[in-house]
Image: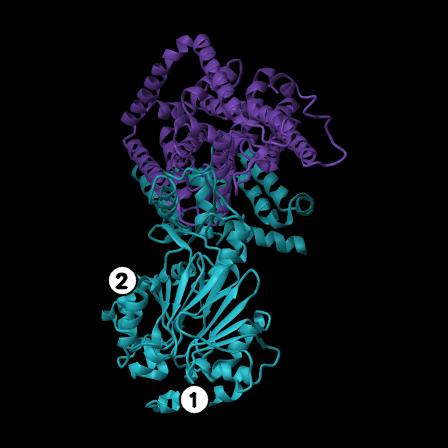
Chain colours: A cyan, B purple
Amino acid sequence: MVWLDFIFEITRQFWGDLGYALLFVLALIAIMMVSSYRKKKQILIYTIVVLVFIYNPITYFVCTKLMEESTFVQYFLRFFNILPVFLIIAFGLTTLLQKAEGIKKLVAFVVAIAVIAGLGNCLYTEEWFTKAENRNKVPQDVVTLCDLFADYEGDTIRIMAPQDVAVYLRQMDSRFSMPYSRYLPDEAMELTNWAPHPDVVAKYAKENDIDYVVVSAVEDVMNPFLNFGFKLYGRTPNYAVLTPFNPDWILTEYEDKSGDQGMAYTMKNVNDGTLILIDGGNAPNEEQMREAIEDNGGVVDAWILTHYHKDHIDTFNAIYENPGDIEIKNVYVTPLDSDTFYSLNLQPWDDIETFETFKRVTENANNINYVNRNDKLSFSDGLNITFFNACDDVVINGREDVPNNVSLVFKMETANRSVLICGDAHSKYLAEYLVDTYGTELKSDILQCGHHGNNSMPIETGFYDCVSCETAIFDAPDWLMTGPDYTAGALAAHFIESGSRVVWFKTAPNIFGL
Amino acid sequence: MIRALLFLLQFTLIPVAMGRIITYKAKGECFENGFVRYITGLISSWGIFYVLFSLLEWFQNWNTYNEPFIGCYSALKYSYMVVSIAMVVVWLILDWKRFFGIKDFIKTFFSNLYKEIKTNRFLPIYIAFFALALLVQSYFAYKYEINEWSYDDYDYVVSSVDTINNDILSNSSIYTGDSQYMQTKRAASSWTTYIAFISDISGYDVTTVCHTILPVILMWVAYVVYFIIAQALFNKKEDVFIFMTLLSVIFIFGNHSHYALTFRMLCTIWQGKAVLFAVIVPFMYYYFMKLFDGEITNKNILPTIAISMGATSLSTMSMMIIGLLVGSIWITTSIYHKKIQSIRYLIAGLIGPVYQLIFYWLICLLLEDMQGGWPQHFNRSRGNSWWYKWFG
């Protein structure tokens, strides 16, 4: 009964709602009954011959042996096209109209047209049939994309694009060369993914020798690629052409699982697996950071703690106290001793308990390194870290929010890109000091905004002009970014006006290549 | 302008000349019809292109070793142009007087039409209806597009684009453009190469030719075929135009499924399989019905073979469809006349499918050899190749 099921299925697929099947049968009857055409029987015989061919089990079984399984049905359905269905319907209707004369014939003719229209389905009203944007009849974005490469001098342009673009690019310019065919790899889905993984695309691009990547120009899709380090080559209204970036290091900003502000980053060398952590966030972030460490082999080569507030180091304290399978090789902290700490004008939010826990769990440790201003650290593949701020007389004598301003401020840079981490440093005097002391050395592609971007370094200090970042990171949840009681939103607006991109927990984890 | 003219010649002068030469000695009622000769010439021109294509395709692949063998597309282009020009010259020599007779043909056609209009005041209305339907369809064919991507579309167009740019016949990867990626189903039919040829000589982008120009031209060609059939079915002009109008309305509203002829006729008629179903199948139905009903003579063998070859040039599916069509018509006429019909015509009609089947089979074997299959099916080597001996 497989054959019968098949016959019913292809009949349904070919004839649709059977309106035209009915017209076809009526037309054949009309031709046989009414037509004066001398050889009308030939039409009937031919129709029967073809239908017998289609509707018999021998054809079915022979075709199953000869045709590919994947295309069998669509090829089999093409047999219907040797049946002149439309010609027979038109012939039958015209034969009927021949019985009338003059105005009656004209009226009948109009009625026949109405019947055809009523039983049929108009092609021109289909949603997929629309007015073309250009004479090539390819999407205008594709034409514009090709124009972007008009002056390109190479013979081959290795390009990776979403499928709705990929199928047209080579139609317009055969210099384009695709890494994939009809069936898209998972990596290609990232090109239009609303939460893309640029690192996945970067890896694929490297492995497949890709020169350019086409992504959706919607900001939520495009910006993660730009943040990662892809460069904008050109764009159309709906797509952006990017040059891929293959970083040695990847910096990841994590959302704080407590729902509050918090700061947790990993910095990983994709070649040798070296892992650096920066802070770790509130205590509820522990599981997330443990997973991040274990995913990277369970070894932390360097853990940099900017300062001693709970939203920065409670997770560190928990992991350090009970590391499990995690090995922490070196910890780098700002040198705030207990005497100085307790001598400060401490506020309820200065988290004495967190400070004391840190001191307790690291009491006999031999891997705690206190960092001073202008210290430098070097890691593999040319990663250098330079510290621009730490707890010292500059901060202590400033006497303004010392527990935050002792934050390690440091620049991590490779030959390709750089990021400036500010921890919770935020006061005006400190911003001015950094600008006066370090000036253009502060220039970085990525900025982690001090104090979660809220009451951060004042704009008028010129700090942000010195940094002149492409992307500003706010370690903040939505409520802090948009709440009327906080200034993070205003600072974000300043960055956007200046042409920088802004990210916060909303799109986390946010990743950046260095 | 000259290039646009070169494009148009492929659908005007060249089919007219080829049609006349190929049917020069043919006998039968249908060959007296100028439209039939034109369509015969058009399909034959594709058939001649296909023969040249298959020879050069074979030659190219026979001589392809480690590096691509470049130049066979150019060789095909120029050889077909030489053949076309030669056919036109021969036609002009043979038919010099009739060449000027085309004026009389047009004059007679319109004067007869005018006479009928004078005696039948409704005829202009039916003509106007048909003209309007044709105009609407032409407008949509020219201005509208399918706004969903299609793999077929990609495959066809890119095959043509690569043919021009790589100067290689059907041996490029449609994804990377790299040479030596043969799709045997493309290698065994010449339609994408023919599109490359008419794009190349006209200077239009392949996309423009495929998506914008050919849909209009080939739709008109299809309506010429339907007009031929209408003339065979009806004696009165009024009925002919009623039939044509109803048919065109049926096409517009006949989108009962994706497999309906409407989609192929009004959306993708530039694709080989669409030409096959919208133009070739109805024409061959008419042609073979007339042929089997007429006098059996060897003089009709040449146009029959030419049509069969042209029909199979469109797609590898042609070998199945044309074989089935010719066979069905032969069975039909045999039943109708209650006697076995001309085997000669049947064989002539099957020449194209058989040619394609053999060529396809040989190409598959050659491809196995090219891919290093063992034992080798053919005794070929660079050292034995006359091409490499002479030209290095």
Q: Secondary structure at mark 1?
A: helix
In the rendered image of this protein, does residue B153 appear above or below residue B105? below
Label located before the other in sequence (1 or 2): 1
> Which of pointers 1 and 2 indicates the residue nearer the eye?
1
Is residue B210 rendered to the left or right of residue A102?
A: right
The one nearer the camera, B334 or B72, is B72
> Image quadrant of residue A460?
bottom left
Task: Identify the residue under disc 2.
Answer: A498
Image mark 2: chain: A
Task: Identify the residue under disc 1.
Answer: A338
Q: Secondary structure at mark 2?
A: loop
Q: Is residue B231 visible?
A: no
Residue at (51, 89) in percent of width and height? A360
Relative image position of residue B45 (x, y in whole percent): 50, 23
> Image quadrant of residue B120?
top left
Relative image position of residue B105 (x, y in whole percent): 37, 17
